[in-house]
Image (tube, grey):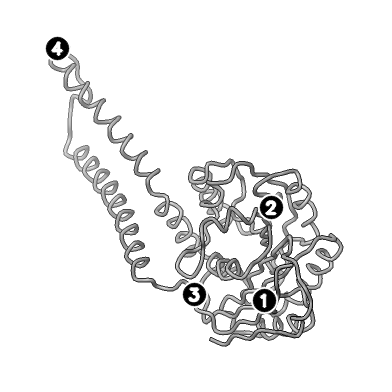
């Protein structure tokens, strides 16, 4: 790993910024300059203190070269990180979180699908005292399959987090930094949106503009989305297993009542039991059992990986500017 610390501004006193803006990049060589220009103008006009942290999520194009050029000319870009390989947006965000010093954390995609100029709208809601302020894509410019899969994901996330948020997948968010830091996300513990939401008291969602993707393609695939859902279901597994237990107990109770009534009252349900019906019931129970075993297996494997201290990401190169608390 290459680590470079810039001491050119070491003689200047720096106070901790109000906002740490964490940006992950994946094959964004065509969009990063425009995105950075619009972001820096928006932040400068806000008259709030801030720092910008860029994480290159294993891009093999010229994304990191352009990030280094931006880092050299802008003192507000305090850290740039280059990861060895693509590890996914949430893990890349984790790498950025470990470098952040701000009171609040700001996240937004660098692919130009979201208008960074709308950041003041989120800041205005944060100033009202909300723990988390999130954008939701009111007119989403994605494929039908992507929208449908997101609806399923949002349904699960609402159950896990305990908050009625319509668009968890929108990266345009501001968090109270204390919420995120309390989880101690890092090299062996991935940032999880639902976990943070589950500990927040007040959340606010506001509409934001969503535009068609101009360059490249999204890093979110069906495989990564499924992994994301499993992270939240398995990571907070006590809830789904409690519900499963309650459902099983409920049907067990109904069956017991039916058997007892049959001893005293002459009635019958499904008087004719055919081989086809028995086969269908057996297959249904088999599928349910396999699903539960798969969830338990996933939970076991993840615990094993955690115990092995398997790193979520490895930094190839990092550049940071020396700062000190004022």
Q: Looking at this view, is 101 or 147 the one in front?
A: 101
- Left or right, 251 with respect to 33, comes to left
Disc 3 and disc 1: Cα gap in Å?
Answer: 17 Å
Nearer to me, 156 or 81: 81
Task: Identify the secondary structure beneath mark 1.
Answer: strand
Mark in the foreground, 1 or 4: 1
Residue beneath label 2, please?
A: 137
Reading the chain from its start, which is encountered first: label 1 or label 4? 1
Say which label, 3 or 1, has the lower sequence index: 1
Circle 3 sits in a helix, a strand or a loop, which is it?
Answer: loop
Report x, y in % for residue 141: 68, 58
Location of residue 72 by image quarter? bottom right
Q: Tell me if label 3 and label 1 are in contact, CB under 8 Å.
A: no
**First-in-chain label (3 vs 4):** 4
Residue at 71%, 75% (x, y): give it. Answer: 323
Task: Give the label on residue 313, or none.
Answer: 3
Occupied quadrant, residue 50: bottom right
Residue wearing tag 1:
79
Give me the C-alpha separation between circle 2 and circle 3. 29 Å
Answer few, some or many: residues within 10 Å of disc 2's Cα (few below 14, many 20 plus, some between 14 and 19): many
The percent position of residue 281, horizontal first and vertical second, equals: 23, 40
Which residue lies under the disc numbered 4? 264
3 or 4: mark nearer the eye: 3
Distance of label 2 from label 4 (alpha carbons)? 60 Å
Q: Which mark is residue 290?
A: none
Tell me the distance, in whole angstroms, between the alpha carbons under discs 1 and 4: 77 Å
């Amino acid at each position: 790993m290459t680590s470079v610390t810039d001491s050119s501004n070491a003689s200047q006193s720096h106070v901790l910024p109000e906002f740490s803006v964490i940006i992950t990049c994946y094959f964004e060589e065509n969009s990063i300059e425009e995105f950075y220009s619009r972001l820096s103008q928006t932040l400068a006009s806000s008259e709030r203190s801030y720092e910008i942290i860029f994480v290159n999520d294993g891009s093999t194009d010229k994304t990191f070269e352009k990030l280094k050029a931006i880092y050299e000319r802008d003192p507000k870009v305090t850290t740039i990180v280059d990861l060895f390989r693509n590890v996914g947006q949430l893990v890349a965000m984790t790498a950025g979180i470990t470098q952040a010093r701000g009171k609040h954390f700001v996240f937004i995609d660098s692919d130009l699908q979201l208008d960074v100029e709308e950041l003041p709208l989120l800041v205005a809601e944060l100033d009202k005292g909300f723990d988390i302020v999130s954008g939701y894509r009111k007119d989403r410019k994605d494929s039908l399959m992507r929208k449908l899969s997101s609806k399923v994901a949002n349904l699960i996330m609402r159950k896990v987090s305990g908050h009625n948020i319509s668009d968890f997948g929108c990266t345009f968010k501001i968090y109270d930094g204390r919420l995120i830091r309390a989880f101690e996300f890092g090299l062996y513990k991935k940032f999880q949106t639902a976990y943070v939401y589950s500990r927040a008291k007040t959340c606010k969602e506001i509409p934001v503009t969503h535009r068609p993707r101009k360059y490249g393609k999204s890093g979110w695939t069906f495989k990564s989305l499924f992994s994301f859902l499993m992270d939240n279901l398995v990571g907070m597994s006590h809830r789904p297993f409690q519900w499963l237990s309650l459902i099983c107990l409920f049907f067990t109770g109904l069956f017991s009542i039916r058997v007892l009534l049959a001893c005293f009252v002459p009635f019958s349900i499904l008087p004719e039991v055919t081989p086809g019906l028995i086969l269908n019931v057996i297959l249904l129970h088999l599928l349910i059992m396999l699903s539960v075993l798969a969830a338990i297996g996933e939970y076991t494997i993840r615990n094993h990986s955690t115990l092995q201290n398997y790193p979520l990401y490895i930094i190839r190169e990092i550049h940071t500017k020396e700062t000190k608390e004022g």
